[in-house]
Amino acid sequence: MLRVTVHPSRSWLVVLFEGGAILIFGIMTYRNWGSMSHMFRVLFVWGLVSAAAALIFQFSGTEIIEINCEKLTVRKEVHGWERKRDYSIKECRELEWMRGGEDTPPSLQFKNGWRTVRLGENLSENQAIEILTALQQSVPEAALQLCSYPDGKTHFITLGLS
């Protein structure tokens, strides 16, 4: 079995920006509290609480990826709450590291049936290579299935090894 724990990582510049935006929004809400209707008060308080909770959530959770010969399990834990998803190795394929884009952070992804499943967000390319190498060494049968591609699809990953 291979077990990988992925801790959240965020840019401190983004965190400061998000915290500053929440603070400014809170100050504006406080200053205009008396002139707002009750519905807007509820709406603004709900927005502030959810924004603060989202910021805390981004830093407090860990993701545990477990791979054995039969299944791939992804657990996301946040302050004792756990969300667990199991995938049969027989139905998984095309495991690869994706560079990410404007709206998506770099991560590993694989196909499960027709769905694309993302895991290990904000992994660097070197970290992804370490995970894929450990997978091939510890559970080669699962690695063979996870890294397979359908017939006719040519795909390769350049590792940059010397």
Image (cartoon, grey):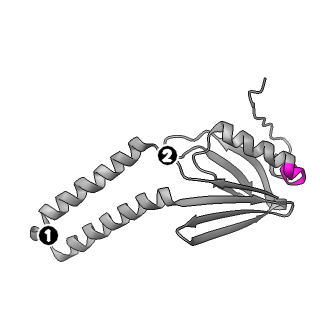
Q: Residue placed farthest to the bottom in the image?
A: 38
- Name the residue type under label 2: Asp
The x, y position of residue 129, in whole percent, is 73, 39
142 in the magenta segment: yes
- Name the residue type under label 1: Met
Q: Quadrant of the N terminus?
A: bottom right
Which residue is nearer to you in this view: 25 or 145? 25
Q: Earlier in the sequence, mark 2 or mark 1?
A: 1
Left or right, 29 with reference to 129: left
Q: Residue placed farthest to the right in the image?
A: 141
Camera sees residue 136: yes
Left or right, 43 with reference to 103: left
At a point 56% along the width and 72% down the height, the residue shown is: 81
102 in the magenta segment: no
Left or right, 150 with reference to 101: right
Camera sees residue 113: no
- Between marks 2 and 1, how big is the CA–CA gap? 34 Å
The x, y position of residue 84, in whole percent, is 66, 69
- Specify few, some or many for label 1: CA neighbours under 10 Å numbering under 14, 14-19, or 20 or more: few
The x, y position of residue 104, in whole percent, is 53, 46
- Residue indicated by mark 1: 36
Quarter residue 87 falls in: bottom right
At a point 45% along the width and 43% down the height, the residue shown is: 11
Quarter residue 54 falls in: bottom left
The x, y position of residue 4, in whole percent, is 70, 54
Which residue is nearer to you in this view: 113 or 36? 36
Which span is picked out in magenta? 138-144
At a point 29% along the width and 51% down the height, the residue shown is: 21
How many marks can you see? 2
Label 1 SS: loop
Label 2 SS: loop
- Residue indicated by mark 2: 103
